[in-house]
Structure formats: C-alpha cells, structure tokens
Image: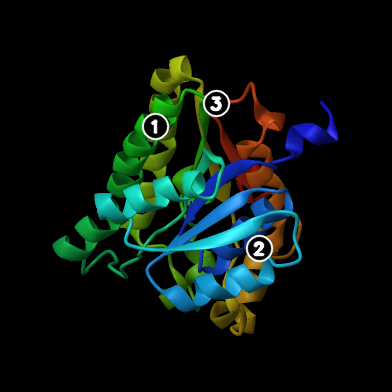
Amino acid sequence: MTDGDFSLHGRGVVVTGAGGHLGSAMALALARAGALVVAMGRTESPLKSLVEAADSLDGKVVVSVGDVSNADDVANAIALPKAHGVTLNGWVNNAYVDTPSFFGALDRNEVEQSIRSGLVNPMLITDQVASAMRAHGRGGSIVNIASMYGSVSPTPEVYADNPDFRAPPAYTAAKAGLIQFTRHAATYLSKDNIRVNALSPGAFPGADTQSETSFMNAIAARTPMNRIGRPNELGGSIVYLISDASSFMTGHNLVVDGGWTAW
C-alpha cells in the first residue's frame, strides 16, 4: 500500500445528507483527498458552506439540492461528476431523517418513516447507483452509514436521566438492516467491481446534545476511550473505504466507536 492508494484525485463521490453534522465532515475529508465531491441535501445553505470550506483543499465540492427519496433527484446527483469531467467512483448513503417514536407510544407512521429513511432509501439508491457504475464499466465503492446501534442495543442506563436522547427502536432496526443489506449487496455487486461496505459511527453527538453535560459524562463513562467522537475522526475511515486502499474489502462493517462495542 502506498499514499497513492488513498488518493481520490480525478474521482467523483456523492455524499447524501452532506449538510449535516457527520455528512459535512465526511464530504470535506473526501475533498481533502482530492475527490470531486457532490454534496447532496435538501437545504442549500449548509451545502454552499461546504463549497467555501473546500476552496483551499485538493479536491472540490459541488452542490446538488435534492431529496434522496426522489429517484430523479438521485439521478441528477449521479450525473454531476460526469458534468465536471470525472467518473462517479464513490457514493456515501448518509442521509437519514429520524422520528422520535419510543416504546409505549410507537406510532406506525413514524416507525415506517424511519425505516424508509434508514433502510428503504439506501437500498433503492444503491441499486440506482450500481446501475450507473455498471454502465460506465469502472466499478466503484458504495458506503452505507450505519451505527454502532445496528450491532448492539442501546444501554438504557446511559439515557436514564436524559430520555430525549434515546435511540428510537426504528432507528436501531433500520441500521441493523442496513448492515445486513450491505453484506447482501456486496456479494451480488462484486462481479461488477462494485464494493459495498458499511461505516458504523459510535457516539458523535451534535452541538446541541453536547450542551447537556450530564449526558456527555454518561457517554464518556460508557466509552473505553472516555470521550465522544469528533466528526473529523470519521474522515480517515470514509476515505479508506472509498479509495483503493480498501480495494480488497467488501461486505464489511467498519465500526468507529471509541471502543463502545468492545465490552
């Protein structure tokens, strides 16, 4: 392996949900590695901020405003790398819309919405993206953003004093399904030189959640590294999975959780 294996120069990568807490960090990491990054999201302003943030990087960020549940919007994002003179080599299924529906008051519509967002949309998008990669004949890498809670259950005690921060059951079920779908897709798409892997972040709370000191302490105490994750700490992993550095890896779930799932 050489440094060149991590290079994404001349490659197009789409990141859905790119305006969010983790999506923006991953988009910038890919641009830093030289990629032409298509930042896809429903709101334009945070995507434009990414364009400015990437101005001094080796790669470039372009904006694609759209909804991942709309096949035409996905098709527009798929077409953008070619419009900028590069091939679509990578796709990151990161977009997710959560619904706070918990045990004792599970709402059918909210549960179904979470499953659609966290599992159905990535499944359909993967199929659409794989068709495009198959058509250009150069293969590619698709990464599904799952969660440590797709592999282990939440610890109720961590959320005892902060119930609003609990992971809804539909979220954990969707992420578990996404990990299994990743394995399934990997076995069927490998013949087309398309790799499919999952990346499962651990505790990476946003700024609003970080203001709750007691909850941050509870998370830190549950994590072997005794702290929360920083968004930029997903950068190396997403570049690795999209680049040739992971050329013999498919169907894998890479967990970045500070050791949470180790005990």
Vertical side of 4 occupied by 259: above or below: below
Residue 130's disc number:
1
Q: Position of residue 178 (x, y in %)?
A: 39, 41
* Residue 237 visible at all: yes
Q: Nearer the viewer, residue 175 or 154?
A: 175
The residue where tag 2 is placed is 231
Q: Which mark is residue 250?
A: 3
Residue nearest the observer in this picture, 208 or 130 = 130
Quadrant occupied by the N terminus = top right
Q: Nearer the viewer, residue 164 or 143?
A: 143
The residue shown at (16%, 63%) is 109
Disc 1 from disc 2: Cα separation: 28 Å
Q: Position of residue 120 (x, y in %)?
A: 28, 46
Give the percent coordinates (x, y) of residue 90. 53, 40
Look at the picture and state if 58 lies above or below 123: below
Q: Quadrant of the C terminus?
A: top right
- Disc 1 + disc 2, Cβ < 8 Å: no
Residue drawn at point x = 75 percent, y = 60 percent: 57
